[in-house]
Amino acid sequence: FAADYISLGIREPVYEVVEVKANGSVSTEKISRRQLLKSSGLRLRDTRSVDPSLWLMNSMPSLLVREQAILLNLGSLRAIAMHERVLIFNYNSPGGKVFLELLRPRLNPRNINGGPAMPFQLEVVEAALLSRIQRLERRLMHVEPRVAALLEVLPNRLTGDVLEQLRLSKQSLVELGSRAGDLKQMLIDLLEDPHEIRRICIMGRNCTLDKVSDDMECAVPLEKQVAEEEEEEIEMLLENYLQRCESCHGQAERLLDSAREMEDSIAVNLSSRRLEVSRVELLLQVGTFCVAVGALIA
């Protein structure tokens, strides 16, 4: 693989990533693409969804499950979760910082009740979804009061500043609704594909999926029972974040509809004012014509 790069005269890409292990240790390292593919068991085409250099081409959120890794592409968060560690690209981005803040406290060998914690890859997936949902909800909480204040002022107060604030708020709502809608569709697609959920459950275990029935087959019966329980937990987890995402998306769409209705009301108001101005102009023209006729007769 490296020889192909050398023969073509292409420098092999090197990524600077933050590695978080299951025990909570965090380190920054540089890893080449060849080392990344070798350690994660991925193929070259798999890394396109998390490659920071291709962020313009891969703006849609995605959660790809492979045999040994889960690839996360959620906004500015790009990460590869494996059985005992996760590699975070663009760790200085807002999404990467929030993800790290949420993930590190969760890496506790015991939960609050004293029972075993969830598998590491599930902790990573939940922290990634939670960080993305929280960012969308915070943006909604920031935009909603501004839109409510504008709806109270308009259409009685038509000034340039107020109309500009309405335009910016509408632009923010369009962007927020688009991102929340994309994330909602990703969660729906994942919930409708039980095969992908089962692949997450058997990761790191001596289990396989039957190609015909898609049932889990494990060497140890206890592992199969644990994997089936994790499958239910994953579905409940995805359903929870899907509801939060739908709530955020629905509220953004309602605010956007209110802003659009206000724009229509403003347009009607301005049209009414233009008709009044045209009426006055017509009266002035008629008056001018009458005066001109009188002057002509004189």
Image (cartoon, rainbow, N blue to C red):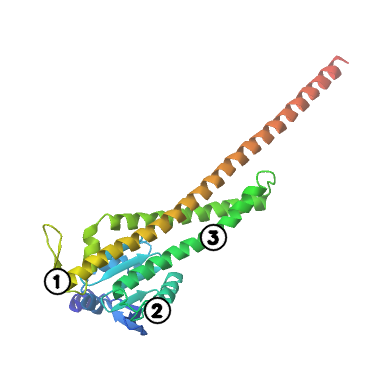
Q: Is residue 89 visible?
A: yes
Task: In the displayed orientation, state which residue is furthest to the right.
Answer: 298
Image label count: 3
Q: CA distance from mark 3 to mark 2?
A: 26 Å
Q: Earlier in the sequence, mark 1 or mark 2?
A: 2
Name the quadrant containing residue 184: bottom left
Viewer-side residue, 222 vs 35? 222
Q: Residue at x 51, y 54 (%)?
A: 173
Image check: 149 left or right of 170?
Answer: right
Numbered tag placed on residue 141 in the rendering: 3
Q: In x, y percent, where is residue 85? A: 30, 79
Q: Nearer the viewer, mark 1 or mark 2?
A: 1
Q: CA distance from mark 1 to mark 2?
A: 32 Å
Q: Is residue 65 visible?
A: no
Instruction: State yes or no: discs 1 and 2 in contact (Cβ < 8 Å).
Output: no
Would you name the residue on which mark 2 appears? Answer: 104
Viewer-side residue, 64 vs 214? 214
Going by the numbered disc 1, the residue's amino acid type is Pro
In the image, residue 211 sits, relative to residue 221, either above or below, namely above
The kind of secondary structure element at disc 1 is helix
Packing grade of label 2 (10 A; few <14, some 14-19, many >=20) is: some
Going by the numbered disc 3, the residue's amino acid type is Met
Q: Nearer the viewer, mark 1 or mark 3?
A: 1
Q: In x, y percent, where is residue 295? A: 86, 19
Would you name the residue on which mark 1 appears? Answer: 221
Viewer-side residue, 212 vs 290? 212
Where the C terminus falls, by quadrant? top right
Q: Residue at x 41, y 76 (%)?
A: 100
